[in-house]
Image (cartoon, helix red, strand yellow):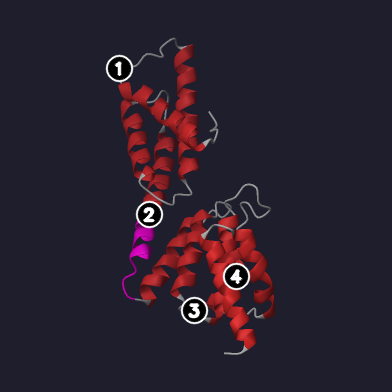
């Protein structure tokens, strides 16, 4: 092994340890110049994409919410290595989280399906396909139910909301969770305001109050203020 190869191996070992420890800035500091020097190396591209993906979830980072860089890096890998299962899988996770794209769930499912097409059973990919299927189902049913909604919330609608929340709470990751909670909160609090105007806030359905508790628990748990 040459001195250059030994130094490269040592630096890559440091990069992987920094990633394991969640020290993404340190990992990028070492990895970025290596990738600039050898941009065609898929190991470097993959781990740099992983770092940018992780940094996109840190609100203190400049890259917060920006998933364009990992998408670009992973697509670059797949142009040269179209059957790279790890790149397809990570790209699926990136698409799942990319709420700026209206078709993000469909794109994610396509990547996970590619993993299953090109390799033996891949349990994580199968799990994510089920995950995406649930998110798409809730999204579709929510749109259908709310488009037909007329007047005050019915017991059936409240029970349906609980069914949806139960389905999405079992998913991880679930980029649509905030959107689903926010939509339900909007409908619930609009109904609550209407009930107060009608002086009819009381309800025989205890789940009406339990739904408000579920919404408030989500706000407390995540620190995210929903509309409503």
Quadrant where the N terminus is found in the figure: bottom right
Give the CA distance from mark 4 to mark 1.
Answer: 55 Å
Residue 17: x and y in percent read 53, 65
Give the CA distance from mark 3 to mark 1.
Answer: 58 Å
Give the CA distance from mark 4 to mark 2.
Answer: 25 Å
Q: Which residue is mark 3?
A: 82
Tag of residue 172: none
Closer to us: 160 or 126: 126
First reached walking from the N terminus: tag 2 or tag 1: 2
Vertical order, 7 against 87 (above or below): below
Between disc 4 and disc 3, the foreground one is: 4
- Contact between labelled residues 1 and 3, with CB atoms less than 8 Å apart: no
Q: Which residue is mark 1?
A: 204
First reached walking from the N terminus: tag 3 or tag 1: 3
For disc 2, the neighbor class at 10 Å (few under 14, some 14 to 19, many from 20) is many
Q: Is residue 76 visible?
A: no
Q: Residue drawn 48% across and 56% down?
A: 96
Tag of residue 131: 2
First reached walking from the N terminus: tag 3 or tag 2: 3
First reached walking from the N terminus: tag 4 or tag 1: 4
- Contact between labelled residues 2 and 4, with CB atoms less than 8 Å apart: no
Between disc 4 and disc 2, the foreground one is: 4
Q: Which residues are magenta?
A: 120-132
- Contact between labelled residues 2 and 3, with CB atoms less than 8 Å apart: no
For disc 4, the neighbor class at 10 Å (few under 14, some 14 to 19, many from 20) is many
Q: Is residue 130 magenta?
A: yes
Q: Residue drawn 40% across and 55% down?
A: 132
């Amino acid at each position: 092994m040459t001195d250059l190869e030994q130094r490269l191996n040592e630096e890559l070992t440091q990069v992987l340890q920094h990633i394991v420890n969640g020290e993404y800035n340190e990992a990028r500091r070492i990895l970025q110049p290596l990738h600039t020097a050898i941009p065609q190396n898929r190991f470097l591209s993959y781990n740099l994409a992983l770092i940018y993906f992780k940094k996109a979830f840190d609100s203190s980072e400049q890259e917060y919410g920006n998933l364009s860089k990992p998408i670009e890096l992973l697509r670059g890998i797949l142009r040269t290595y179209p059957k790279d299962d790890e790149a397809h899988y990570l790209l699926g996770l990136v698409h799942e989280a990319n709420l700026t794209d209206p078709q993000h769930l469909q794109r994610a499912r396509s990547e996970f399906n590619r993993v299953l097409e090109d390799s033996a059973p891949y349990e994580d990919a199968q799990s994510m396909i089920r995950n995406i299927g649930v998110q798409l189902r809730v999204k579709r049913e929510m749109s259908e139910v709310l488009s037909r909604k007329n007047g005050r919330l019915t017991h059936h609608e409240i029970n349906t909301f609980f069914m949806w929340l139960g389905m999405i709470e079992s998913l991880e990751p679930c980029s649509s969770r905030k959107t689903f909670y926010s939509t339900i909160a909007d409908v619930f609090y609009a109904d609550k305001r209407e009930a107060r105007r009608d002086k009819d806030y009381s309800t025989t359905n205890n789940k009406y109050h339990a739904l408000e508790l579920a919404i408030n628990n989500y706000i407390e748990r995540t620190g995210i203020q929903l509309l409503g």
